[in-house]
């Protein structure tokens, strides 16, 4: 009651002060006493979180000009109370210094050691202790060191583990290439390798496009030349491995070397090979591409196949029906994979056209399957290609193997299938070459390329005469088709070199036809064919 009386007195004094004219006084010099909520202790529903209302109906003019508004919230068991008062911050309140009284809002701060849960705030705006704010949970001053003490060793340990792992990797890389230190026959130190991304996981370098974060060039020692194309030369080479002590283990690889002027061709082939979706057992296995700046050369490093290309193989060997079936089927599967917009797992892939399919651009693997190589003229048929870009890609390929529509530059650029159909035509000529050397056709003549040996490299004009004007195709004598398998193969060839591109079979369909002929395997055996000369014997004979 006493306090209520005091408050009423304050209130009347305030009215007098507010209403009385301040004549003759300097308003700037006069310090007014504050209006604050002043209910002393009362029960509250405020639970000490967020924003609360003090629930005090009494506003007082503070007794002293220096007084500020103060609120105190306490919780003792389940009892919660709020004090709203005026207080001069020059003096301690409950043994506490008010250090936040310049605030315009009353922001509660917890004080420990008060016996109960205790929050206090002070502020200087009129009635500012009516609304009180409990700040979100802050880390207690004791919690911070505890968290720091437990986290710092963990952080130090993590940094240590990462650093050791990094040092170990660097050490391994240094040791992996002894040629780096001992002085390699090829200067690769001032060059940098172009490294292909890879989705594979095998650590062998023979797994194409393996992720190789090494920015140094591979330790490669060139051996003999095994091929020469329009834009590049191919070498058999040793890819060195392991430690420098004693005889060095190596892997045989093929290196296709482009001179400076052929950079565009190297880049095109590298870009095609870099697509990991190209990988297939019937496509040459790509390892990496390198810029050998010191020698002004560009390299493509791939798997090496001792049998060499299919033209060389057919020149040297008469094959059995089974060989034909293996060679032809694998060729069709390689082309079908290239053309397909699906990987073997059914994911989308960019279809690719080769545009230079011929027997010298196909390699023979040890199991007598084919793999496609030389993608220098390859084209990725991605959706972004415009008709103009396709048109500018020009009349490319080897005249002997060019489809009629390529010879007369009349490809339907609106339809990407047209490019695939030109590949199928060229593939038909290769299938004919394979068949011409198979003992199941009867008498086997010496190897001859399709359209004969008229000239080593017939020009476009002479091919136009044969293929367009005369509608000529390599001959399929009746005597060939006594064998049921050869009959199907020749029927397939005929459908693939049709003058009308749209009438041609797809490579996928050709691959299926070969698959369906598996039962004909038993008709003739491997031993029907002549004994194969091994690649080593071939090189020995060549050296004589
Ligand atoms: N001729 C061209 N490329 C070749 C390769 N990768 N292996 C063997 N001979 C080749």
Image: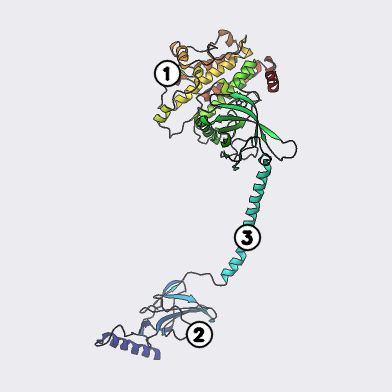
| Relative depth, front residue between 224 and 403 | 224
Earlier sequence position, callout 3 versus callout 1: 3
The N terminus sits in image quarter: bottom left
| Relative depth, front residue between 489 and 252 | 252
Q: In which quarter of the image is ligand 1?
A: top right
Residue 186, horizontal then vertical, whole percent: 63, 35
Q: What element carries label 3?
A: helix
Q: What element carries label 2?
A: loop
Q: How crowded is mark 2: few (under 14 residues within 10 Å), some or many (20 or more)?
A: few
- Asked whether residue 488 is in view, the answer is no
- Asked whether residue 386 is in view, the answer is yes
Q: Do callouts 2 and 1 mark residues in contact (Cβ within 8 Å)?
A: no
| Relative depth, front residue between 110 and 418 | 418
Earlier sequence position, callout 3 versus callout 2: 2
Q: What is the total number of numbered labels drawn onto the structure image? A: 3
Q: Residues within 10 Å of mark 3 (few under 14, many from 20)?
A: few
Q: Name the residue under label 2.
A: 95
**Residue 520 in the figure: left or right of residue 355:** right
- Mark toward the viewer: 3 or 2: 3
**Residue 315 in the figure: left or right of residue 459:** right
Mark drawn on residue 156? 3
Q: Name the residue under label 1.
A: 408
Residue 484, horizontal then vertical, whole percent: 59, 14
Q: What element carries label 1?
A: loop
């Amino acid at each position: 009651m006493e306090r209520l009386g005091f408050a009423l007195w304050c209130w009347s004094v305030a009215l007098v002060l507010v209403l009385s004219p301040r004549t003759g006084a300097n308003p700037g010099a006069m310090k007014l006493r504050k209006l604050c909520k002043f209910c002393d202790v009362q029960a509250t529903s405020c639970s000490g979180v967020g924003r609360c209302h003090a629930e005090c109906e009494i506003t007082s003019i503070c007794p002293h000009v220096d007084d500020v508004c103060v609120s105190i919230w306490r919780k003792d068991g389940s009892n919660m109370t709020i004090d709203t008062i005026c207080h001069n911050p020059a003096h301690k309140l409950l043994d506490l210094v008010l250090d936040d009284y310049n605030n315009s809002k009353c922001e509660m701060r917890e004080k420990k050691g008060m016996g109960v849960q205790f929050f206090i705030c002070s502020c200087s705006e009129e009635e500012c202790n009516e609304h009180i704010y409990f700040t979100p949970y802050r880390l207690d001053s004791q919690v911070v060191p505890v968290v720091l003490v437990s986290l710092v060793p963990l952080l130090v340990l993590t940094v240590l583990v990462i650093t050791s792992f990094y040092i170990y990797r660097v050490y391994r890389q240094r040791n992996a290439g002894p040629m780096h230190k001992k002085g390699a026959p090829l200067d690769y130190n001032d060059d940098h390798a172009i490294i292909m991304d890879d989705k594979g996981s095998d650590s062998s370098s023979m797994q194409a496009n393996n992720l190789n974060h090494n920015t140094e060039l591979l330790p490669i020692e060139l051996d003999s030349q095994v091929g020469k194309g329009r834009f590049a030369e191919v070498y058999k080479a040793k890819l060195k491995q392991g430690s420098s002590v004693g005889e060095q283990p190596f892997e045989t690889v093929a290196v296709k070397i482009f001179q400076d002027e052929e950079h565009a061709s190297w880049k095109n082939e590298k870009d095609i090979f870099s697509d990991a979706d190209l990988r297939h057992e019937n496509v040459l296995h790509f390892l990496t591409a390198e810029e050998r700046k010191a020698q002004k050369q560009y390299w493509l490093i791939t798997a090496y196949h001792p049998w060499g290309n299919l033209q060389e193989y057919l020149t040297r060997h008469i094959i059995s029906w089974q060989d034909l079936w293996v060679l032809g089927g694998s060729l069709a599967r390689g082309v079908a994979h290239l053309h397909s917009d699906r990987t073997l797992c059914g994911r989308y892939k960019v279809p690719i056209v080769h545009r230079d399919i011929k027997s010298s651009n196909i390699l023979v693997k040890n199991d007598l399957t084919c793999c496609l190589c030389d993608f220098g003229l390859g084209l990725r048929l991605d959706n972004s290609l415009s008709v103009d870009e396709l048109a500018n890609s020009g009349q490319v390929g080897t005249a002997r193997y060019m489809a009629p529509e390529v010879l007369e530059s009349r490809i339907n650029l609106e339809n990407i299938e047209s490019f695939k159909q030109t590949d199928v035509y060229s593939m038909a000529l290769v299938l004919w070459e394979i068949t011409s050397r198979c003992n199941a056709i009867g008498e086997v003549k010496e190897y001859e390329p399709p359209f004969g040996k008229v000239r080593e490299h017939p020009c476009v004009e002479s091919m136009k005469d044969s293929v367009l004007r005369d509608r000529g195709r390599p001959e399929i004598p009746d005597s060939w088709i006594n064998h049921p398998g050869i009959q199907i193969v020749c029927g397939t060839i005929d459908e693939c070199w049709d003058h009308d591109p749209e009438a041609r079979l797809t490579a996928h369909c050709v691959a299926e036809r070969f698959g369906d002929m598996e039962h004909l395997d038993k008709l003739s055996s491997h031993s029907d064919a002549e004994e194969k000369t091994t690649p080593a014997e071939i090189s020995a004979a060549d050296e004589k």
